[in-house]
Amino acid sequence: MSEEQRIFDGVLFAPGAQELRAIKLRAHDLNTDYNSTYEYETEKRAQILSQLLGSFGEGSFIQGPIAFHYGVHTHIGKRFFGNFNLTVQDDAPVTIGDDCNFGPNVTIVTPVHPLIASERKTMLDQNGEKRHACYAKPVTIGNDCWFGANVVVCPGVTIGNRCVIGAGSVVTRDIPDDSLAAGVPCRVIRQITQQDSMQYKPELLGGYSVLEEDEA
């Protein structure tokens, strides 16, 4: 079994294994290439992301700078917007749905290290060789989510559709659909309902109006 397959199987793997180091080196170099571009260099940026990520949906945009650990383990849907300093430590797969918006400094992490200090340093692998090892849990984010600045999503978390995660939150557990959630650790504050519509905040509209659902 390859070390990458061990990641996908959710068991201990050796992050220093040559096959994984090669994937990460390629991703880190592509991060550097992307971060060296100007914002108007749209074709160059698109080409880099097509090499870096597992998939990147139509109409999506990442401000940069970016930091993807493996890159190819991340799949991003359509019309995504990622603000400054998006960091994705995608040892395990990271899946982000359509129409999501992330504020600056959002971080998604998937690896988990043993709690016992000696086990973090060294363990014996399946062949009896000493290795530094960890494991990883996938992160899944639904459609139409908005994350405020400095949100951290921890390993193994699933966030449902149409959620809003408040700035500075550390998400350690699953968040159901249509939730307004915030805090450290992040907790659901309440469900988002139609009463949250901007149509009930006329003082903020300034001449704007709300589209009907079939027009949006």
Image (spheres, grey):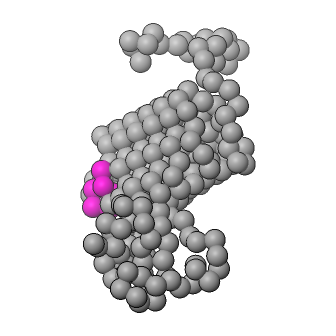
Q: Residue at x 46, y 85 (%)?
A: 124
Question: Considering depth in this image, is 114 or 149 the residue closer to the camera?
Answer: 114
- From the top left corner, tell me how far across and down residue 32 is, in percent: 41, 70
Quick check: 158 above or below 164? below
Quick check: 168 above or below 37? above
Outermost residue, bottom side: 129
Q: Is residue 53 magenta?
A: yes
Quick check: 178 above or below 185? above
Q: Residue at x 47, y 50 (%)?
A: 139
- From the top left corner, tell me how far across and down residue 28 is, in percent: 40, 71
- The number of numbered badges drawn on the structure is 0
Q: Is residue 124 left or right of residue 29?
A: right
Question: Considering depth in this image, is 14 or 202 the residue closer to the camera?
Answer: 14
Question: Considering depth in this image, is 85 or 110 the residue closer to the camera?
Answer: 110
Res. 196 image quadrant: top right
Q: Residue at x 72, y 48 (%)?
A: 184
Res. 99 image quadrant: top left
Which segment did they paint magenta?
Answer: 50-55
Quadrant in the picture for the N terminus: bottom left
Can residue 34 be seen here? The reply is no
Q: Residue at x 32, y 43 (%)?
A: 57
Q: Is residue 112 magenta?
A: no
Res. 208 image quadrant: top right
Q: Is residue 99 left or right of residue 53?
A: right
Can residue 122 be seen here? The reply is yes
Quadrant in the picture for the C terminus: top left
- From the top left corner, tell me how far across and down residue 63 is, in percent: 47, 51
